[in-house]
Image (spheres, helix red, strand yellow):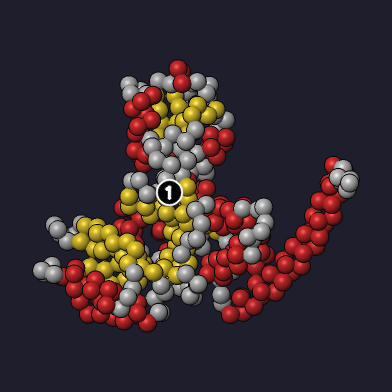
Amino acid sequence: MTKKPTLKELRNKIDSIDRELLKLLAVRMEISKEIGSAKKARGVSAYQPEREEEIIAKMTASNRKSALSDIALRRIYAEIMSASRALQEAISVGFLGPEGTFSHIATIRHFGHSINLIPRRDIPEVFIGVEKGVFDFGVVPVENSMEGTVNATLDMFRHTNVKINAEILLKVVHNLASLTGRREDVRMIYSHPQPAAQCRAYLNTHFPDVKLIETQSSAIAAEKAASNKESAAIASEYAAKQYDLKIIDRHIEDSTNNITRFFVIGHHLNKRSSRSKTSVLFSLKDRPGALYNALRPFSKNGVNLTKIESRPTREKAWDYVFFIDMDGHVDDDPIKESLEELNSKARFIKALGSYPACREIL
């Protein structure tokens, strides 16, 4: 009978593997520095989302026999690539703050921790910060699977010249937290409007008569709850820990399929990835069949439209702009031909960028 290794022997094996991993990581970082020099000489950004997505896709495809989950592997590589990028170029990222918001969590999970984080009070400030070069990239929410489109984000694409560089899908988990951690102490609840809307059933069941106070973000809700023992906040676990709050109830969202989509915005245009998406903004002259005729070229050329959203221009009554997402890269012939036809019919058209389609919900 084969003798099982002792705990000490197993730990010695782990120590040996860790030393080898460290050596390999050191080699990887040295090569990353050389790549950074080559990028700098060509005027290329250290952040290349299509290349990073390609690396992670290859690694997850090779991970079928491992006990390591694809999500865990993705998070490990997010930090490895974050450290690599930091050796090549200091990168700053603006997000809808303060720290502890879901925008903050999405930013960290996508970019890793080796970045300069710059919180902003609202979505327009993130767009303006990117456009003016206050920071290199921004992360903004664009839609939620339960509450729909974030209108402020779509509106800002009309008024700025930023590009979409990547998308992030984040599973949203809401918790009710307070200083005491006891339901019976709660006399008021702080929340951003969207989390409150996503937790309606829970609030109606457990706190039907408790005053709900609106805040600018879930992190601010947690901060306010930390100053009053009779208050609670709908917040992420990250925000609760940051403000020393105790969780009263976890997963209070009405649906377990609560996912928010974010865009990474910047200035550069991405090359093709193995699975690209493209977003376009356009407006039409008001005439019968205008929208049908505008969208027909995409059907004719076999382009799959994954989203269409209309927004009022606010310039005159019943005047709209349309936001569409589609599978593929803007340089793909079917998309290129479709956009050329759309351009002949549109009052204006703006390609917002092509970017790697997100493969995993973080």
Decide: is 146 above or below 200: below
What amino acid is at disc 1?
Answer: Ile
- The percent coordinates of residue 31 (x first, y second) are 72, 71
- Residue 266 visible? The answer is no
> Residue at the left extreme?
288
Question: Along the line of sight, which residue is nearer the eye, 281 or 124?
Answer: 281
Please report the residue visible at 34 percent of the width from the left and 38 percent of the height from the top.
197
**Residue 203's quadrant in the figure?**
top left
Decide: is 47 above or below 42: above
Check disc 1 and report its element: helix, strand or loop: strand
> Residue at the top extreme?
184
Please report the residue visible at 43 percent of the width from the left and 42 percent of the height from the top.
256
**Residue 348's quadrant in the figure?**
bottom left
Please report the residue visible at 45 percent of the width from the left and 27 percent of the height from the top.
232
- Residue 131 visible? The answer is yes
Question: Along the line of sight, which residue is nearer the eye, 298 or 9?
Answer: 9
- The percent coordinates of residue 267 (x first, y second) are 45, 69
Label count reads 1
- The percent coordinates of residue 177 (x first, y second) are 49, 29
> Residue at the front extreme?
1
Decide: is 259 above or below 274: above
Badge 1: how crowded within 10 Å, few (<14), some, or many (20+)?
Answer: some
- The percent coordinates of residue 28 (x first, y second) are 72, 67
Please report the residue visible at 35 percent of the width from the left and 46 percent of the height from the top.
146
**Residue 4's quadrant in the figure?**
top right
Decide: is 196 above or below 300: above
Residue labelled with disc 1:
259
Question: Along the line of sight, which residue is nearer the eye, 40 or 176?
Answer: 176
Left or right for 324, reference 46: left
